Image (tube, helix red, strand yellow):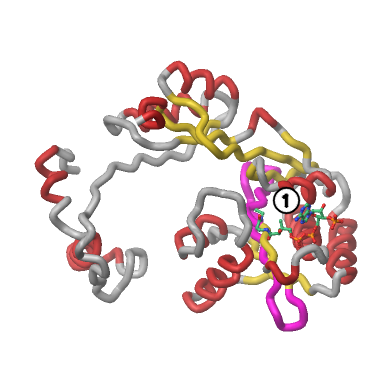
Amino acid sequence: MSELTASLIVELQSIDTPTLCNALEVLVPQRHGYGYTTEPLFCARPELKPIVGIARTATIRSGRGVGGQLLEHVAGAGPVRTAVLVGDDSSLEWAQRRGYDRHGQVNQRREAILAASTAEYQHRALAAATNVGTYVERWAPTSPDKREELRQLYERTKLGLPNDTPPGATLAEVDYLFPPVAEVLLARDGEVPVGIASIAPSVPGSWYNWYVGVVPEARRHGVARALKVAGFAVASEAGAVRLVTHNHAANDAMIALNESLGYRHVPQGDLQYLRPVAFAEA
Ligand SMILES: CC(C)(COP(=O)(O)OP(=O)(O)OC[C@H]1O[C@@H](n2cnc3c(N)ncnc32)[C@H](O)[C@@H]1OP(=O)(O)O)[C@@H](O)C(=O)NCCC(=O)NCCS
């Protein structure tokens, strides 16, 4: 891979993103189906100057020192003006000694132990859905049309979600929250979709609850509870003994629901959003 020199950055700043994407589709044709598009893109706002940045990403599976490893990895990219997540207090202290501090959102980790039998969870799931006149079914939104349908439903259900993502919903956001390994649960009122959930296998014995959302007009009728309990049944059926999730600390509704279902807060697994102090003050 070429070194990203100052002159290369200047050169890249002279080319807009659609042009680069079009070139990649020609130069690396095996990306077809994985790239931005199979049709040429054009720049909708040519008056806006292209921006060049460096993103370093990592997935770390480890019990301790997660923040330290991630910061070392990110710092290797050069001057850092980015946000990182850490997962425990020792990592936060490590990061603070290196000029980072908490910035904004904290996602609280919660865990529920699946102690009942699968049959019991299936029974509870059916009862929870029936109680509120909702039908919860597994859904496999894999085709482009279905992904778009999912994106539109997600966009409607995320209204009021207290996180830092902009309004609207991109397919990238959808791909993140509804990865291919996820079981997608759809709640319907008759034929009308009213809620959506995503749960997926995580480390052995654990499943992760990625997302639950309900369209505003169907809220406070127990739809999210029905989706959550259906998720317990699916995870239990797959052999999980634990369900894990993260809740934005300001999401009172979701936290209340989770705690009523037996999720317990595990502070040492909270995700903290950090920024370099120098950048925050700039
Ligand atoms: C959070 C959300 C999923 C709840 O959906 P819902 O279908 O209205 O929830 P339910 O009717 O099943 O409520 C179950 C419990 O959650 C809690 N709850 C739900 N909405 C609440 C609110 N606005 N304020 C306080 N508690 C609330 C209550 O404890 C409620 O039980 P109760 O009605 O017996 O008091 C919904 O508000 C939503 O989609 N928000 C935007 C997306 C989001 O934040 N998703 C979570 C991120 S993963």
Q: Residue at x 68, y 68 (%)?
A: 215
Mark 1 Cβ and ligand 1 under 8 Å apart: yes
Magenta stretch: residue 200 in it? yes
Q: Nearer the viewer, residue 59 or 82?
A: 82
- Residue type for callout 1: Met
The quarter of the rendered structure image containing the C terminus is: top left
Quadrant location of the N terminus in the rendered image: top left
Q: Nearer the viewer, residue 252 or 244?
A: 252
| In this view, 57 is above or below 200 | above
At x 50%, y 53%, the residue is 165
Q: Residues within 10 Å of mark 1 (few under 14, many from 20)?
A: some
Picture quarter with ligand 1: bottom right
**Residue shown at 59% from the left, 27% from the top:** 88
Spot occupied by residue 197 in the image (x, y as percentages of width and height):
67, 61
* Left or right relative to 55: residue 265: right
Q: Is residue 225 magenta?
A: no
Find disc 1 in the rendering and name its residue: 254
Q: Which residue occupies the extreme top position in the image?
A: 97
Horizontal and vertical percent position of residue 164: 52, 48
Query: Residue 68 or 258: which is nearer the viewer?
Result: 258
Left or right placement of residue 218 versus residue 53 in this view? right
**Farthest residue toward the bottom?**
191
Q: Is residue 51 left or right of residue 216?
A: left
Query: What's the magenta bit mostly, secondary-structure-wise?
Result: strand
**Total number of numbered labels?**
1
Tell me which segment is drawn in magenta: 188-211
Q: Name the element at disc 1.
A: helix
Measuring from the top left, give residue 33's x and y in whole percent: 35, 69
Q: Position of residue 123 (x, y in %)?
A: 89, 63
Image: 2 above or below 210: above
Q: Is residue 109 above or below residue 254?
A: above
